Image (cartoon, rainbow, N blue to C red):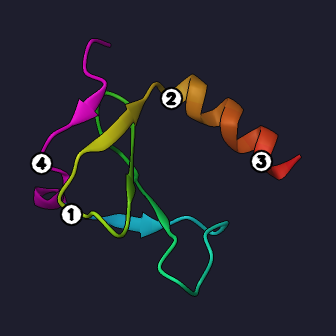
Amino acid sequence: MTEHTISAPGTLQGWRKSSYSANDAGTCVEVLDNYPTGIPVRDSKVPHGPALLFPQAVWASFVRAVKG
């Protein structure tokens, strides 16, 4: 995977707020499922970009660590 960011994530549909994000103060991390080359992650306060793109295995490891 050579792509590390998505410069115009606002054009993509299907973003969802992370269940670990706070409901107040607008501090939310959003992720996009089913993106073909990895897991896009963005700050909800800056929805038009950029978004970071993580390899599936790296994102899965991060989620396991957060849940642990």
Nearer to us in this view, 9 or 37: 9
Q: Disc 3 versus disc 1: distance between alpha carbons?
A: 26 Å
- The residue drawn where x is 16% and y is 60% is 10
Discs 2/4, front = 4
Q: How many badges with numbers are in the image? A: 4
* Mark linked to residue 56: 2
For the record, the magenta segment spans 1-12
Q: Counting residues from the N terminus, which is met first, the one under dot 2 or under dot 3?
A: 2
Nearer to us in this view, 32 or 49: 49
**The residue positioned farthest toward the bottom in the image shown:** 24
Quarter of the figure with residue 6? top left
Label 1 residue SS:
loop
Q: Which residue is mark 1?
A: 13
Discs 3/1, front = 3
Instruction: Answer with left or right where residue 51 lies relative to residue 38.
Output: left
Residue 47, position as x, y percentages in the image:
25, 64
Q: Which residue is mark 4?
A: 8
Quarter of the figure with residue 46? bottom left
**The residue positioned farthest toward the front in the image shown:** 25
Residue type indicated by callout 1: Gln
Instruction: Answer with left or right where residue 56 lies relative to residue 14.
Output: right
Q: Counting residues from the N terminus, which is met first, the one under dot 1 or under dot 4?
A: 4
Label 4 residue SS:
loop
Discs 2/3, front = 3
Q: Counting residues from the N terminus, which is met first, the one under dot 3 or under dot 1?
A: 1
Residue type indicated by callout 4: Ala
Residue 53, position as x, y percentages in the image:
36, 33
Residue 33, position as x, y percentages in the image:
40, 51
Q: Disc 1 versus disc 4: distance between alpha carbons?
A: 11 Å
* Mark linked to residue 66: 3
Q: Disc 4 versus disc 3: distance between alpha carbons?
A: 27 Å
